[in-house]
Image (cartoon, grey):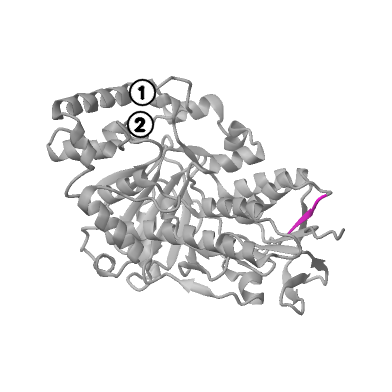
Amino acid sequence: MTDNRIKKILIVGGGTAGYMAAAALTKVLTKDFCQVKLIESEEIGTVGVGEATIPQIQLYNKLLGLDEDDFVRRTQATFKLAIQFKDWHKVGHSYYHAFGDVGKDMEGVQFYHYWLKMRQLGKAQDIDDYTLSALACNHQKFMRAVDAGNSPLSNIAYAFHFDAGLYALYLRELAEKAGLQRVEGKITETMLTNEGRVSAVKLDNGELHDADFFIDCSGFRGLLIEQALKTGYDDWSKWLPCDSAVTVPCESAGEPIPFTRSTAQKAGWQWRIPLQHRIGNGHVFCSKFMSDEEARQILLDNLDGKPLGEPRFIRFTTGKRKKFWHKNVLALGLAAGFMEPLESTSIHLVQSAISKLFTFFPTLSFDQVDIDEYNRQTVFEWERIRDFLVLHYHATERDDSAFWRHCKSMPIPPELQQKITQFQHNGRVARIDNEMFNDLSWFEVMYGQGIRPKSYHALVDNFAEAELEKRLQGIRKVMVNSVDYMPRHQEFINQHCKAR
């Protein structure tokens, strides 16, 4: 019987994407089954700005069998319950895209539909008052879920902020212990077979490294997927016009908050990511509407502490490869494409790609049906996340700059327009084919960005108004009591996982 299995996998590039792939592959694949090698050059470096995550990262951590407290200590991490959006709907307004549940579902209908009715009647508080994660953010509280019956404390969704460089080193250590072969070197040439597949790469010292399957984590260059295989790129800048970012860490200022903050600026937005030892900051902007110097100055003027280095510029074109998997090359991270980290999806997209790779793990035959299905699912995932990001820019009342006037008037993808229209009519959001963001996320952002539905779910009227008012009061009280019970975020870190 012919042995048709993949025996050698070569990962090109390190950084977050490369070492996430390496750690997962060496955890799942035995050394006897497949050899995993990674080539990176210290000269080239990495972008290293993906420092905020979403709760799905816990699935990846579970796959690796990580001790969470050790992981948090080693990466100088903090915990994350939400993303706060300041000045996006209009200047002076803010809202949370909070993780986890909003209120408590009743009779199979999402809580926010009942809230919409009572809010229209002037008998409901802000949505944050019924959302554990948002309330905890307001009071800088955090804890992991505990066994508390029907209490909100039994279901706390959270993610992490961490130092991207330390995270890559942490995963590298895990992968090398599990059998990863790491090679230091700069790739100068890519060899192709007669069928157009990649057969090997050549380093600047003359070494050749061959493999059956290649994972391209070479960043924006796309050394294999683009430079060697000429896969092509879909440009999404007509919907997401920002094309630059300037980043700099700064000294910490007080206790770390348990959420990422995104503040809209004149021609883009600024992120603030609190870690245990510093704060990560970046200003994403559109160079057509703002100069580098102005963008740099806005970043520096809005830091909470002393900058820890010189601001660094990054250029990008929002979009994706036309194929994420082409022939025997799979692209991960920035080699696959780029969407700004507005909803902290960059690391999730790497994680999701690795998961799908295991689902469609190839043989030497590289079955095109499987590759096509991998690409179909990945394109769908990227496009639906793209639409979610476009929503933040397009649904706004801001008209104080040319950039925001452009975003308000630009055409948007038809799938996004359909979602907005449906929500405007009755508050419904149809989640398509298990897309990344569920109806709660769409509700929080659409309502937060100022979209107000004319009506609500028809079954809401199944409850008498007085009964609804009583239930909302009860839910609010439970949320307040739950947050009162939680320790402060810094206190929790000090007790369980403070970095040495």
Residue linked to disc 2 = 132
User: What amino acid type is highlighted by mark number 2?
Assistant: Leu
Residue with the most extreme left position: 121
**Which range is magenta?**
33-38
Residue with the most extreme bottom position: 194
Seen at 39% across and 29% down, the residue is 141
Residue 337 at x, y percent in the picture: 52, 65
What kind of element bears circle 2? helix
Seen at 44% across and 19% down, the residue is 148
What kind of element bears circle 1? helix
User: Is the residue under label 2 in contact with that under label 1 (CB below 8 Å)?
Assistant: yes
- Relative to 272, say whether 132 is above or below: above
Seen at 32% across and 50% down, the residue is 429
Work out whether residue 410 or residue 423 is closer to the camera in this orientation and state it: 423
Residue 35 is covered by the magenta coloring:
yes
Residue 168 is covered by the magenta coloring:
no
Q: How many marks?
A: 2
Q: Earlier in the sequence, mark 1 or mark 2?
A: 2
Residue linked to disc 1 = 482
